[in-house]
Image: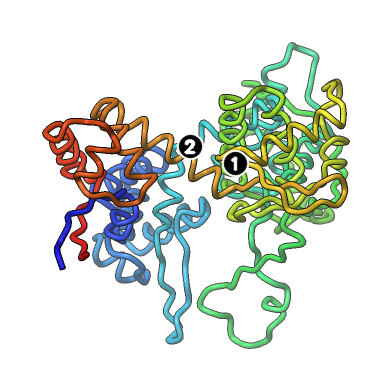
Amino acid sequence: MKDFPLYRFGVFSLALRLPSTMTQAEIKLCSLLLQEHFGEIVEKIGVHLIRTGSQPLRVIAHDTGTSLDQVKKALCVLIQHNLVSYQVHKRGVVEYEAQCSRVLRMLRYPRYIYTTKTLYSDTGELIVEELLLNGKLTMSAVVKKVADRLTETMEDGKTMDYAEVSNTFVRLADTHFVQRCPSVPTTENSDPGPPPPAPTLVINEKDMYLVPKLSLIGKGKRRRSSDEDAAGEPKAKRPKHTTDNKEPIPDDGIYWQANLDRFHQHFRDQAIVSAVANRMDQTSSEIVRTMLRMSEITTSSSAPFTQPLSSNEIFRSLPVGYNISKQVLDQYLTLLADDPLEFVGKSGDSGGGMYVINLHKALASLATATLESVVQERFGSRCARIFRLVLQKKHLEQKQVEDFAMIPAKEAKDMLYKMLSENFMSLQVGCQ
């Protein structure tokens, strides 16, 4: 028996060593984001929960030296924006816990807004912007806010109709870019017993994207200096006191939020389409884009594959004016399925052939390409060659690395040491 040092791809072992808590840099970033968006008090409470984990209300107030009233208001803000969740324990104590990943996603808010602008024009952009700024809003409130904002940008005499904004909101819900928030079930409200320490919020998956039927009639209004009376109270607020006797708003209690996972799914799909275009051609990427678009609602964002699609279905769903024959489409699908990267897989022969997008394999290929480019930029092309080789073979002895990469022993040893010291490689002592 003899021990041989083996060099292998180190990402998997590094992932096992990642700490469960956030790094100091991430906590500092969360602190800056919370302070910029919500102010010092909310930042203090949020960072305290990030550092300590879940805690009850009075402990938070004691540890931060903040009054109960201020802690309650800060927690309301954080819960409103989905940055803090709460849980009722068996003893009836409510504990609050920070959602760190959600705080970091605030960095992507501009990208979410810009994506909606490219897909649904200015109206969609403002709808998502209002939801991100306010955390949760009713559809009627969003429609009125957006109509007013769009009217402000129009020429004098022109206004934005509520119905037009409503139609864009429905399109966003149909494509799952916005979704309903969980709410208190009606059975909990009708319970004659003592109220629970905190409400239990639930949502039926079937209703998550169901838009209430609203007949919003009206147009956006411009803000003018004359809208405020001598007391400084906007005139627009005064009618609220006279609407108590009217019928309640149809969507009262139905709140909406931006579906960030859906935006990430869109970014993933765009990256896959771009990778196919770079590897093959524009026609191949358009075929893959069509398959992803057909599956974007029916496939979970965490699913390894899209739903199987027949060649006939794909052909009928290609963009209007995209002039390729059914025979050419089948040839492209065959080429995509035979490609070593396996972005597209064949799952059956019915309907002219059943095809899926291998989402996990596609993402693994994109991640690998990114890692290789990082190694090449940091260490040079020869290190990238070694890295690619070890990644492909899983583990190699130092002598094998020298032979397969065709690099002199001294240089190979130095390069392996550089990548080992930077945690791009890990050293394993094996027995043989």
- Which of 209/76 is in front? 209
Q: Quadrant of the C terminus?
A: bottom left
Please state the horizontal and vertical placement of residue 217, each as a whole percent of the image. 86, 37
- Which of 301/75 is in front? 301
* Sooner in the amino-acid sequence: mark 2 or mark 1: 2
Please state the horizontal and vertical placement of residue 69, each as a whole percent of the image. 39, 61
Instruction: Residue 321: give its label.
Output: none
- Identify the residue at the far top of this view: 155
The residue type indicated by label 1 comes to Phe
Please state the horizontal and vertical placement of residue 56, each as a whole percent of the image. 36, 72
Q: State the SS at label 1.
A: helix
Q: Quadrant of the N terminus?
A: bottom left
Please state the horizontal and vertical placement of residue 296, each as a whole percent of the image. 70, 45
Q: CA distance from mark 2 to mark 1?
A: 10 Å
Instruction: Residue 108: give its label.
Output: 2
| Contact check, label 2 and label 1, Cβ < 8 Å | yes
Q: Is residue 66 something that shows in the picture?
A: no
The residue type indicated by label 2 comes to Arg
- Please tell me in which quadrant of the rendered image residue 244 appears: bottom right
Mark 1, residue position? 263
Could you tell me which residue is drawn at 84 percent across and 55 percent down?
247
Q: Is residue 381 something that shows in the picture?
A: yes
Residue 203's place in the image compared with 124, above or below, is below
Q: State the SS at label 2.
A: helix
The colour style of the image is: rainbow
- Please tell me in which quadrant of the rendered image residue 287 appears: top right
Residue 288's place in the image compared with 320, above or below, is below
Mark 2 or mark 1, which is nearer to you? 1
Could you tell me which residue is drawn at 79 percent across and 50 percent down?
211
The crowd level at tag 2 (other Cα within 10 Å; few <14, some 14-19, many 20+) is few
